[in-house]
Amino acid sequence: MNPSTAKPRPAYTEFHPRWYRPRVSVYWWLGEWQYLRFILRELSSVFVAAFVIATLLGLRALRNGPEAYARFLHRLQTPTAIVLSTISLFFVLFHTITWFNLAPRAMAIRLRGQRLPDIVIAAPNYVLWLVVSVAVGWLVLR
Amino acid sequence: MPDKTILEIARYSPEQDTNPHFQTYEVPVYKEWVVLDALNYIKDKVDGSLTYRWSCRMGICGSCGMMVNGEPKLTCATFLSSCGGHKIRLEPLRYFPVVRDLVTELSDFLLKLKKVKPWLIRRDTPPLSQGEFLQTPEQLVSYKQFSMCINCTLCYAACPVVGLDPVFVGPAAIALAQRYNMDNRDQGAGERMAVLAHPEGIWGCTFVGECTRVCPKHVDPAGAIQQYKLKAVLDWMKRLLPPSHSHKEGQGESLNR
């Protein structure tokens, strides 16, 4: 058969087979626990953001004088704020700890041909966290 | 008599089908059989039209990767007895176009691989008479883990970013770029950084970490990408410093020859 006169087949072209291209569902993250865990972790950042916003509002109230700061403190004592702060505290701790534990993955430091053990990379983060927390605690509570 | 199990295999014929469908086969389960043995049994004894890739059947060639019960696996390294249940579902690797049955299209992956220049780049080409490039065992160890990649693309099938953002260079290619960056004979880190410090490169990665979990050769592509991100940030910070303090580009300046 002369190729130039042959009618092209509608469904199949030689050398250009029809590939099946699967579409990724919008709900791709619901199908597997690993993906769901990842998305839940990402979503929990919303509470970390809420904590950051509350801190910024606190700083603004502090700048606006003792009365504004007293109003801010009063607002923090409402049940909604206490629940939100508790959830935020949990997720800030969760993200801090998991982030510190991931630090060794990003830092492959070699000393005398040996990669530093994970604990050597992660530990300074925890020590610094403790030092800063104690310093802030001392400043606030003295 | 050996136990039997059911294989549910995705079939797709580009000439006849618009969507894949599943076909079931009953296969014997021997203690020493891997999923690939069952596929070869079907191909030889039951249905010669079943199409899949395989070559070495020993975890070296990287061609027999498939979704086994929804998980990217090398079928030559997955025992039938470890799959659990009486049904094993086999599908082509996720996020790749399907050519036929269990065979995926790899051109896009190969183009991405080429993009990161996974070969030794030298700015100078010293004459052969100067001898070979020497490397100490310590220098070898620094990149050896990333050099174990067999391009099986399981990490691409595990990475949701690959599925959602088809232009993302992907885990294996970035790990391989890092393999050459860490090689003391290479001087191309700057060239690769120009390609990869990009939303389609390292910044596309959201650190789901699935690539590392499924990697059959323990390459840790997720770790490679995070190390690359750190390097990109440090390079950027060094550029902010006065020129006299700026970093000399590339590696391999102090070659042992």
Image: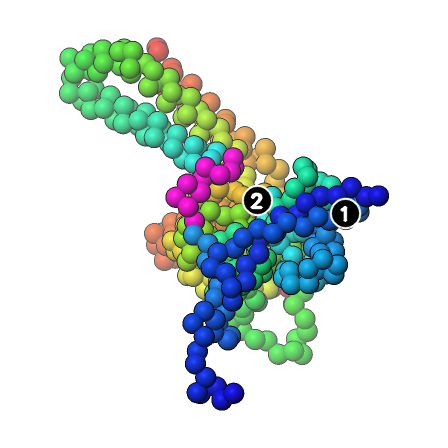
Q: Which residues are magenta?
A: A24-34
What numbered label is drawn on residue A141? Answer: none
Q: Amino acid at mark 1?
A: Pro
Q: Amino acid at mark 2?
A: Gly
Q: Is A30 located above or below residue A77 in the figure?
A: below
Residue pointed to by mark 1: B28
User: Which quarter shows the N terminus of chain B?
Assistant: top right
Q: Nearer the viewer, residue B222 or A13?
A: A13
What numbered label is drawn on residue B70? Answer: 2
Count residues near mark 1 (Cα–Cα under 10 Å), then give few for <14, some for 14-19, many for 20+. Answer: some
Q: Is residue A30 magenta?
A: yes
Q: Is residue B64 left or right of residue B246?
A: right
Q: Chain of mark 2?
A: B
Q: Is residue A22 magenta?
A: no
Q: Nearer the viewer, residue A14 or B198?
A: A14
The reply to whether residue A9 is visible in this rendering is: yes
Identify the residue shown where x is 40% and y is 53%. Answer: B165
Secondary structure of the residue carrying tag 1 is strand
The tag earlier along the polypeptide, 2 or 1, is: 1
- Picture quadrant of residue A140: top left
Residue A46: where, in percent of width, then height? 34, 30
Residue B17: where, in percent of width, then height? 50, 60
Of the residues tagged 2 and 1, which is closer to the observer? 1
User: Which quarter shows the C terminus of chain B?
Assistant: bottom right
Residue A115: where, in percent of width, then height? 62, 44
Q: Nearer the viewer, residue B251 or B32?
A: B32
Identify the residue shown where x is 42% and y is 56%. Answer: B166
